[in-house]
Amino acid sequence: QVQLVESGGGLVQPGGSLRLSCAASGSDFSFYAMAWYRQAPGKQRESVARITAGGSTNYADSVQGRFTISRDNARNTVYLQMNSLKPEDPAVYFCNANVRAWGMDSWGKGTLVTVSS
C-alpha cells in the first residue's frame, strides 16, 4: 500500500495563501488519481479538489477559482495551492490516492489549516 504524508498546514489570515503538499511512497505515483479532502469539526469529510493521472482537474464549487491542485510525478508529490482563504476554509485537509481498477484507496493522516485574524 502507498503511504501519504501531508505538510504545509498552519494558521493564515483571511485573504491569505497557503500551499499544502502530499508526498507519496512507491514507484506507481504517475498512475494514481490524487485528491484533497477536508473535514471541519462536526461535519462530514468533503472532496475539495482532484487531479487524474492524465492531469484533468475538478474542484468543489466552494473553492473554484481560489484553489489549484497540481502534481509533480518526478517528486511523487501533489500540491494544493490555496488563495483568498476564507473563514469557512479551516479544516483538517487529507490527501488521497486511488486507482479504482486496482482496488486501491489510500489516505494520509491530515494537516490542519486555520484561518483567523
Image (cartoon, rainbow, N blue to C red):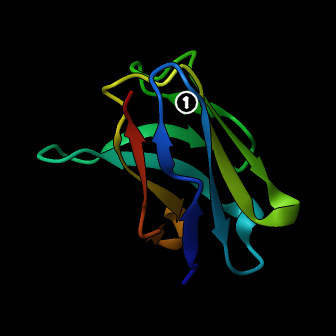
Kindly identify the residue that appears in the image at 74 percent across and 40 percent down: 55
Is residue 15 shown above or below 42? Answer: above
Q: Secondary structure at mark 1?
A: strand
Pick the quarter of the image with the N terminus: bottom right
Is residue 11 shown above or below 8? Answer: above
Kindly identify the residue that appears in the image at 47 percent across and 28 percent down: 13
- Relative horizontal placement of residue 26, taking residue 73 as reference (left or right): left
Q: Residue furthest left?
A: 42
Kindly identify the residue that appears in the image at 19 percent across and 46 percent down: 44
Locate residue 29, reporting x and y percent: 72, 67
> At label 1, which amino acid type do we have?
Asn
Kindly identify the residue that appears in the image at 68 percent across and 34 percent down: 56
Q: Quadrant of residue 18?
A: top right
Q: What count of labels does the image hold?
A: 1
- The front one of 53 and 79 is 79
- Relative horizontal placement of residue 7, taking residue 96 as reference (left or right): right
Locate residue 69, reporting x and y percent: 64, 38
Is residue 73 shown above or below 113? Answer: below
Locate residue 48, reporting x and y percent: 44, 37
Pick the quarter of the image with the C terminus: top left
Residue ID for mark 1: 58
- Relative horizontal placement of residue 82, taking residue 116 as reference (left or right): right
How packed mark 1 is, by other alpha carbons closer than 10 Å (few <14, some 14-19, many 20 or more), is some
- The front one of 18 and 1 is 18
